[in-house]
Amino acid sequence: MRLLLFGAPGVGKGTQAKLLSSKFNIPHISTGDILRQAVKDETELGKKAQEIMSKGDLVPDDIMIGIIKYRLSKSDCNTGFILDGFPRTTNQAVELDKLLNEMNISDVKLVNISADEEEIVKRLNNRRACKECAHIFTLAEIKSSNTCPDCQAKDSFYLRDDDKEEVIRKRLEVFRNSTEPVLNYYKKQGKVISVNGLGAIEEVNKELLKILGK
């Protein structure tokens, strides 16, 4: 099974991707995680990505396509993969199609997860990241704790620049203008599966599995 997870920032793509990855035993490939790791490691790519992402803009196509090509070539993708956060533009979709054709992969489906924009703003503004492990939690998950549930670091939570309201709204504007046309690109190919992402995580996943089962 080869899936592209699609939707606005904060719609729940990453969460659903992890659940599907566990269910079907295929890798969850998150371009966001790859970029955040590069930022943490302070690589040349990470420094460029940090500057771009902190403004709410998209990382240039040449950087993203290079990362995806390298990752899909790994052996754990031979039986399937879940690509989360790519493609974000029609040009990336075209380039991804070229890459998949070269790899003789034709059974890709785009999973479109939708949600109300104001709900997305609320969700993202309620997230906090750990400075040590870079994992992200909701305020409900960490409550009044000052200790990271994953790495046990203390007093490490902070609001990322791209989770601040003004940047979130800029990201949503970028999504509408640059990314939404990707949905139409795949609709023309008959490769789109849609699900409402506003329900509880388990409910959304159940509906998604039901659709995929068909």
Image (tube, grey):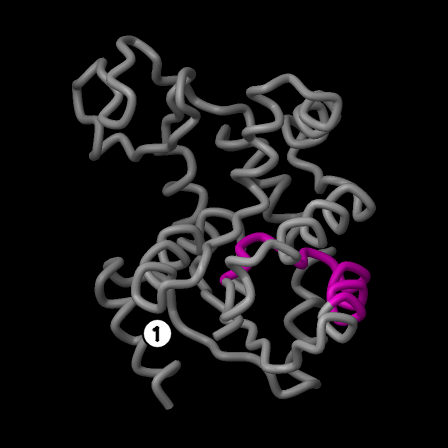
Estimate the x, y position of residue 205 in percent, counting from the top left: 29, 67
Estimate the x, y position of residue 177 in percent, counting from the top left: 72, 56
Determine whether the residue tagged by mark 1 lies in a helix, strand or loop. Answer: helix
Residue sitting at x 76%, y 59%? 92
User: Image height check: is 154 above or below 93?
Assistant: above
Q: What stretch is highlighted in magenta?
A: 82-99
Estimate the x, y position of residue 213 in percent, counting from the top left: 34, 85
Whether residue 176 is visible: no
Q: Which of 143 and 208 is in front in this view?
A: 208
- Say which amino acid is labelled 1: Leu
Q: Name the residue under label 1.
A: 208
Residue sitting at x 59%, y 76%? 108
Locate residue 155 relative to residue 189 in the image: left or right: left
Q: How crowded is mark 1: few (under 14 residues within 10 Å), some or many (20 or more)?
A: many
Estimate the x, y position of residue 58 in percent, counting from the top left: 71, 42
Residue furthest bottom as drawn: 214
Residue furthest left as drawn: 144
Residue furthest top as drawn: 155
Q: Does the magenta stretch include residue 133?
A: no
User: Image height check: is 25 above or below 39?
Assistant: below
Q: Is residue 91 magenta?
A: yes
